Amino acid sequence: MIIRLRNFITNVFYRIFQQRRSLKLGIYGPPNAGKTTLANRICKDWLGEEMGAVSRIPHETRTVQVKEKIKVKHKRKELTFNLVDTPGIATKIDYEDFLKYRLPSKEAKKRAKEATKGVIEAIKWLDGMDAVLVVLDATQNPYSQVNLTIIGNLAARNIPVLVLANKIDLRKANIKKVENAFPQYEVLGISAERGHNIEEFYESLFRLVK
């Protein structure tokens, strides 16, 4: 009787814990790969609102942004998670790079400082992730040091990963190159801006967190 009661209490507390714990889905990648554009599309699809601002200037997102309790439904399946959009990972951030976009020197230095802090913050958040979407620009070289660093950190933590080759609507996009670079992961070509393959993305998302 005592053992049955103990087991009952344990199961109740386990179920309560499971209900309270929220699945964390992170979006990682280099600057201007389309991370926030993807986050905006997911949030608009299921919450009716956007996650954050986007810009052609690198490091528009400089702090971690979170949208909670996003409920995705696909083919009679349902998935609820907290979406974490992170600043673009970079191995070097120089304020002079922002001057090319005609930002004033003071604003460029401020942006570089905030972006550097954002990278550190994004890496710290990795340890709390249940799964990660790695968004890469399919028109760029997938073998960059930044991409290899991101994938290496995820592999070391054994975090489930879905690689998204973004911007397939552009002529220079090369999904095959991304697939060859990271054969250990599922790679899906999408256009977060245009909505290409978004249904396929949601289907892959369910496989990622199964």
Image: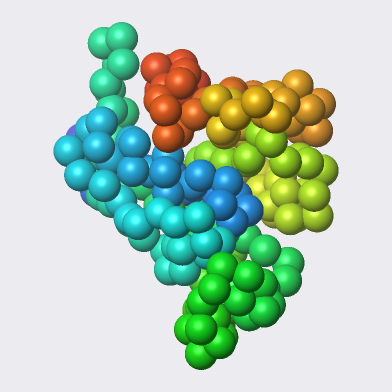
- In terms of image quadrants, where is residue 1? top left
Q: In this view, does 14 lie above or below 177?
A: below
Q: Which residue occupies the foreground of this view, 3 or 166?
A: 166
Residue at 60%, 29% (x, y): give it.
Answer: 170
Does 113 sit above or below residue 79?
A: below
31 lies left or right of 15 = right
102 or 162: which is nearer to us? Answer: 102
| Residue 136 appearing in the image | yes
Which residue: 52% across, 61% down? 57
Coordinates of residue 82 in the picture (x, y in percent)? 32, 47
Q: Position of residue 88 (x, y in %)?
A: 57, 59
Q: Which residue is drawn at 72% across and 41% down?
A: 140
**Residue at the spot 42% in from the left edge and 28% down from the top edge:** 194
Q: Quadrant of residue 89?
A: bottom right
Q: Which of 168 and 23 is in front in this view?
A: 168
Q: Is residue 206 left or right of residue 172?
A: left
Q: Is residue 130 above or below residue 178?
A: below
